[in-house]
Each structure stands twice: as structure tokens, then as C-alpha cells.
Amino acid sequence: MTILVTGGAGYIGSHMVLELLDAGEQVIVLDNLSTGFRWAVPSHVPLIVGDFGDEELVSRILREHQVSAIIHFAAKIVVPESMADPLTYYLNNTAKARNLIACAVAARIEHFIFSSTAAVYGEPQSNPVSEDEMLKPINPYGRSKWFVEMMLEDVARATGLRHVVLRYFNVAGADPQGRSGQSTPDATHLIKVAVQAALGFRPGMDVFGTDYPTRDGSCERDYIHVSDLVRAHMDALRYLRAGGPSLVCNVGYQKGYSVLDVIKMVKSVAGVDFPVHLSGRRAGDPAVIVASNARIKSTLNWQPQHNDLQTIVRQALDWERRLHNRRGED
């Protein structure tokens, strides 16, 4: 049976495809290539260019490729953009996800893994934040993901669709074998931006907010290596195949670094300095958010293997150099 990976030509999705292939799974990718790349999908993996909200297309894929599980990555993810254009986020992340879930139910798919976000917590009352924290997202991006979580919960009660929701914290790094990485030129991920500045691909970078109630005034986040993240999806797939009930888990290291900590690490690993401009806060950014990971470790037996900021930064730098040498490929 085949695993459908939506957004499988993008950053996290392409790593998921590699992880599935390494495990001997059959994979098919659905991606509109708005932020993904054809070359990120191995040549022997079927890539269908299209919209995951297109019910006719998705239904045909599920039927013709005998899909047994869906791992859903495709989404818009930029918080400031969601603040400026909320309706696009509710259309792409929420309404289209409803269509995808409807197709899964109609095709009697039993296993669905959803990439959610720590943004569903908003400003948590305490850190590390557990999955039992009251959800109160403070931006449309977080709300758009929260609505999908609620849809999956309701659908699970009414049908045979079982799911795992994985709430990501800040994903970073690249495949240790150098096969994939964060490739979107205008990506807003902190480590991506910082390594581009270190390599001279940007004139410098901004720090948004230096007056937060944190150690150094900048936001604090939990940075998780992309390979550990996709391994959590494999653990979730095994859990569902073994008959596990629907589940929600954080995916993070239970350790926070400030924006200034990360910039310092990038400068140290790269061995260069670069301009850093201190700017005001961005709307929709919480001060601190760090994962409690007790549930995913105990329930899915997830064990991180790359929990080291220096390693994450070094691999991100290596990938950015490789990416610079292959510019122009779609």
C-alpha cells in the first residue's frame, strides 16, 4: 500500500519522503510546487503537481494508487503573512484540509498524520508547554491549524479515520546525508535567514523584538532537527498501524534558545560576523514557547538523535552552500 505525502516537494515533506523510502515504503507526492521543487522528490517517486484541496484529483490519487495513509504537510506557514492576509490562510490551511479529509473518509483511509504547530498554544501560561494546555492561538496561522485539529477530532468520532496530530516547534537543519534541506529562497525561518547572512547571500538580518520578558529580550524557541521531526512521523505511522487511538503530540526538544543565542551560534559555526539590525516586535509572535515532549517519548517511543544546536546550524550552512551551487533548477 502507498503513503500519500502532501507537500512532499517542500522542506519537511521532502525529508519525509526520504525517510519513508529508507524504510521501504511506497510513496506518492502531491504538491503544487508553490514553495517546493521537482528536484527535491527522487526521480522514481511519482510526483503529481496539483492542489490538495482538489477533491476530484485527490479522490483519483487515493483510488488509483491504493493509498493506505496520508501524511499532510502542505500549508502556508508564515505568521506575519497570516496576520496581513488571514483569509488566504483559512482557505489554504483549513478549507482545503476539510476537502482532503473528506476524500480520506470517502476512500476509507484509516490513518492520517497532520502537521500542526506550536502556534495553537498562543502565549502559553507555562513552559515547557504540554498538550493539555488550553489552546488560544494569537495569529491566523495558528487558528487555521487549530480548526483542522478540531475537524480531525470530530471526524474520528464519526468515522474509522484515526489520526496523529504532531504540533511542531521550530524546525531547522538539513538531511545529514545532504539530500535535502530548506530550499525556499525567501523562507523566513530564523536559522535559514541567519546562515544566508553568514554566507553573504543577504546583507544582514533583523531581530524582531528585543524587549520581551526573556533572558536577553529576544524571543525564545525550541529548535528541532528536521530529521528528528520526520522520524516522529514514522513513529506515528507505526503507532496507528498497530491500532493506536487518535493522538496529539508535541514534537520538540524541551529546550529553548533565544533569537540572539541562535545568531551567536551561526556566527561561531560559520566563523564570520554579519550585520544584525534590531527592530520592533512583529504582530503574532509569542515571547517564549518550548515543548514538553514527555507524551511523544512515552506513547510513540520517539527518541531524538540530533538534539544539538551546533549540529543543526552546521548542517543548515552546508545545505545552503550546496543550494547556492544548484540555483536555477526548479
Image (tube, helix red, strand yellow):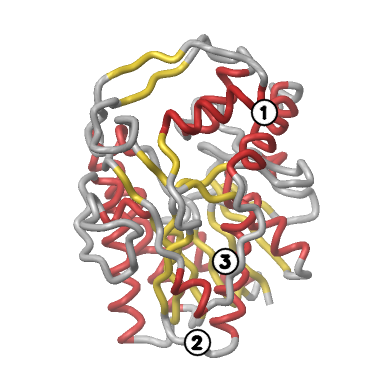
Q: Locate residue 161, reporting x and y percent.
A: 43, 81
Q: Secondary structure at mark 3?
A: helix
The residue pinned by badge 3 equals: 233
Give the spatial CA distance, label 2 vs label 3.
Answer: 14 Å
Q: Locate residue 136, reporting x and y percent.
A: 19, 57
Type of the residue with mark 1: Glu
The residue pinned by badge 2 equals: 244
Query: In the rendered image, which quarter is residue 185 located in?
Result: top right
CB under 8 Å between discs 2 and 3: no
Q: Nearer the viewer, residue 276 or 82?
A: 276
Residue shown at 55%/66% (left/top)?
60
The residue pinned by badge 1 equals: 320
Residue shown at 44%/76% (left/top)?
163
Q: Quadrant of the N terminus?
A: bottom right
Q: Considering only vertical position in the picture, is 271 above or below 249?
A: above
Q: Nearer the viewer, residue 174 or 152?
A: 174
